[in-house]
Amino acid sequence: MDLQELATTARALVNKDKGILAADESTGTIERRLHAVNTPSTEDSRRAWRGLLFGTPNLGAYISGVIMYDETIRQQSSEGTPFVRVLTDQGVIPGIKVDAGTKPLAGSPKETITEGLDNLRKRLDEYRAMGARFAKWRGVITIGDGVPSPYAMHVNAHALARYAGLAQEAGLVPIVEPEVLMEGTHDIQRCFEVTETTLRRVFEELSLQGVSLEGMVLKPNMVISGTEAKQRAQPSEVAEATLRCFRRVVPSAVPGIAFLSGGQTDEEATMNLNAMNRQEKVLPWELTFSYGRGLQSTPLHVWSGNPLNVAKAQQAFLKRARMTALARQGLYTPEMEHSAA
């Protein structure tokens, strides 16, 4: 383990002008998204979609790293170039999702535990040899009647820390993703309480397991109202609550926080990130993004599986990346959505 190399990579991932593209959807998830645009999910269609994103000209101006899925990191572009090299040629750091998804938690079936620790050391070494320089693991916390339980918070925090330690051992920067889901009727205060408690448990476990904070990136949810809340909090409220929460629990040694979009619309995720970076200019960590749907939704609908739409879809993707990169600097305005090409 080279702690200096890990710290250097972590800082590059949270570059002041860029963010991370999450293109690590499982086969089941990407199948649903492709079907939504009337495109069958095959190995070739998945390769074509990810190749469209990775091959977008000037991608490295706005994207620092890309999280890939196991199938994707083994694939090549239509020209026969491995995707890892397509990214590195653009100045983008290749990454890999290493968890095996969520399963019902024994003893609390309304909650989940993330699996994938078995044989993880071996898989991490393989991904490192393939060119990955960072990894990602997602733990999921649900808000609802009687949940989350301390039990679910503990086991998910423990698994996140075990993964992070193994990733650093293999020379990969761990992106640690404890996601408090947006789904539900809860208000922003309930999200605040659960997010604070979750992050406290995560950092307790990271400390116990000797994870170097300087060589990791946190990928959390924003403190935000539930999707079915009677009154959704506005960007200024989301920014204030999120920053207040994170100041309480995220150590200053962590180089950056890369927010997930978590089901927000493209513009909602952009406006909320912008409000945070506009509200506070002096923070102990960089505030950036690691969006999946928040970057891909619009270009996916433009593409819709049609090879003739590749250039237009890449243009839409680059615009979305540019808008989000501006929000990452607190420079975004909604008017830019209509004026930018």
Image (spheres, rainbow, N blue to C red):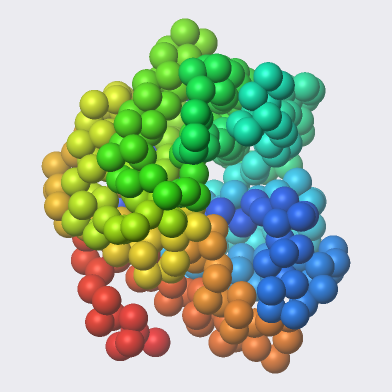
Residue at 33%, 87% in the rendered image: 338
Residue at 70%, 91% in the rendered image: 308
Residue at 49%, 66% in the rendered image: 295
Quadrant location of the C terminus in the rendered image: bottom left
Where residue 130 sits, quadrant-wise, is top right
Residue 102 appears in view: yes
Where residue 196 sits, quadrant-wise, is top left
Q: Please, is residue 237 above or below residue 252 in the view?
A: below
Q: Position of residue 116 (x, y in %)?
A: 73, 29
Where residue 311 sits, quadrant-wise, is bottom right
Question: In the drawing, does residue 94 fall left or right of residue 201?
Answer: right
In this view of the protein, which residue sits in the foreground, 229 or 131? 229
Q: Please, is residue 189 above or below residue 270 in the view?
A: above
Quadrant location of the N terminus in the rendered image: top right
Residue 259 appears in view: no
Question: In the drawing, does residue 54 fall left or right of residue 120?
Answer: left
Residue at 41%, 14% in the rendered image: 204
In this view of the protein, which residue sits in the foreground, 15 or 35? 35
